[in-house]
Amino acid sequence: MRDTRNSLSGNGSERLEFNTALLHQAAPCDPATGATLPPVYQVSAFAQESAEKLERVFHNQAPGFAYTRIGNPTVDAFEKRIAALEGGIGAIACSSGMAAVTMALLNILQSGDEVIAGAGLFGGTIDLFGDLRQLGITARFADTITAERVSALITDKTRAVFTELIGNPKLNIVDLKAVSALCRSRGIPLIIDSTTATPFLIHPLEWGADIVIHSTSKYINGGGNAISGIIIDSGRFEWDCSRYAGFSEYKKFGKAAYLAKLRNGIWRNTGGCLAPFNAFLNLVGLETLGLRMERICENAKRLAEYLQTVDGMTVNYPALPQHPDYALVQSQFGGRGGAILTLRTGSKERAFRLINHLQYALNATNIGDVRTLVIHPASTIYAHSTPEQQITAGVYPDTIRISTGIEDIEDLIADFAQAIAQL
């Protein structure tokens, strides 16, 4: 039977398989030249034939581009590809994944508002909520995002629920159907950071999420050569102007109210736009997302299976049967556990020694590269978090985070084996 988990709609009513859709969905050839990839429009400004036309472009009354900070053809092509891939009504690209998280939240929050967030977030996102506190925005953290825990934290000031679909590096999985149903019943938007899941594993909008965020620097780019982020809107959430300030003038945009407010407000005014060349690099990387994810998910599982046979090591990987969210991996992700696993070695010293003896796995602060990358989270990406925050996020002094690449698994296992032998 044909597996439609990763199928997407084509130009007609047919359903395209994932890799076909990556190449042919919302990806027309350049009409002027027939180029199979959008050209890089590496310019700051765009001239129009008249002052009247430029006025209409500025007021969103005519198609066209004026200034790359507020719109660029290469970036526009990337936004349309990702929106189609995720099944959203539109998308807005940002200069980084953190910029995307920040803009997605600030588009709807103001002083006095509260947001419920998963405590097992990426360290940079936890730091961001500390910054938002200075603006009068309070984050109420749940150790795990479940319908029950979220329900218990909701107050009359709650304006959003934000979580990573697969925690990084805690590797806990959110039950999207249950949490989205709870949020919908309480009139609160569910914002999902799906960076570590990727569209290859799941399309969160189809499971009830309202807004999806990706740090496209990671798996979508795939080559570790461009910092970027993107926000995709489902267009389904009804923005009550009495609860969400500033939406009154954007109600005329209907389902696109969130994106219209974002593009014409905080995103535009803070200047967190994506560079055209970075958008182009992402478009190139996007086309092999399916092939890469299939390989690195398999590599992650096989490496995890090997490491759990090593005495003195504790492995955390969602697709292992002993993982507490194993059932969700089967139901939501078709049995694939993603590309990240963590390893507890017994002490910080042993963790450092193992990292230092690896030959192919690189010690670098990134995920989603074609190369396998390792890092000691407690001393790097969680350096600004409190010990309590680190533990809640699944970060311990002896933890190593491993982001698998596309290497031959035999070489990858051999590399870890020789490093472990030197402990």
Image (cartoon, helix red, strand yellow):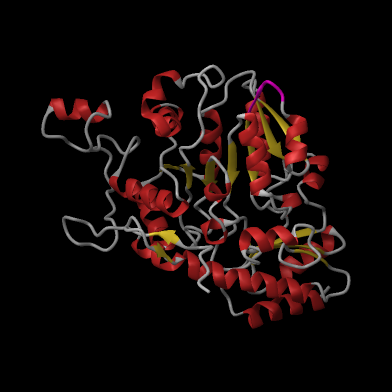
**Vertical order, 36 against 245 (above or below):** below
Q: Nearer the viewer, residue 256 or 296?
A: 256
Residue 415 lies in quadrant: bottom right
Count of numbered badges drawn on the protein: 0
Q: What stretch is highlighted in magenta?
A: 155-159
Report the residue at 53% width, 74% height from top: 1
Q: Position of residue 335 (x, y in %)?
A: 66, 67
Looking at the image, can residue 122 be seen? no
What secondary structure characterizes most of the magenta part? loop
Residue 147 lies in quadrant: top right
Q: Position of residue 196 (x, y in %)?
A: 60, 55
Q: Where is residue 98 in the image (x, y as percent from the top left)?
A: 55, 41
**Vertical order, 113 against 383 (above or below):** above
Report the residue at 69% width, 71% height from top: 301
Q: Which of 418 and 356 is in front in this view?
A: 418
Report the residue at 27% width, 58% height from top: 28
Report the residue at 63% width, 41% height from top: 180
Q: Where is residue 250 in the image (x, y as percent from the top left)?
A: 40, 24
Quadrant, the C terminus? bottom right
Q: Nearer the viewer, residue 331 or 202?
A: 331
Apparent side of residue 44 relative to residue 140 in the rendered image (left or right): left
Q: Nearer the viewer, residue 229 or 419?
A: 229
Looking at the image, can residue 353 be seen? yes
Residue 118 lies in quadrant: top right
**Vertical order, 379 against 257 (above or below):** below
Within the magenta stretch, is there residue 215?
no
Apparent side of residue 261 relative to residue 114 in the rendered image (left or right): left
**Vertical order, 193 against 419 (above or below):** above
Q: Residue furthest left?
A: 49
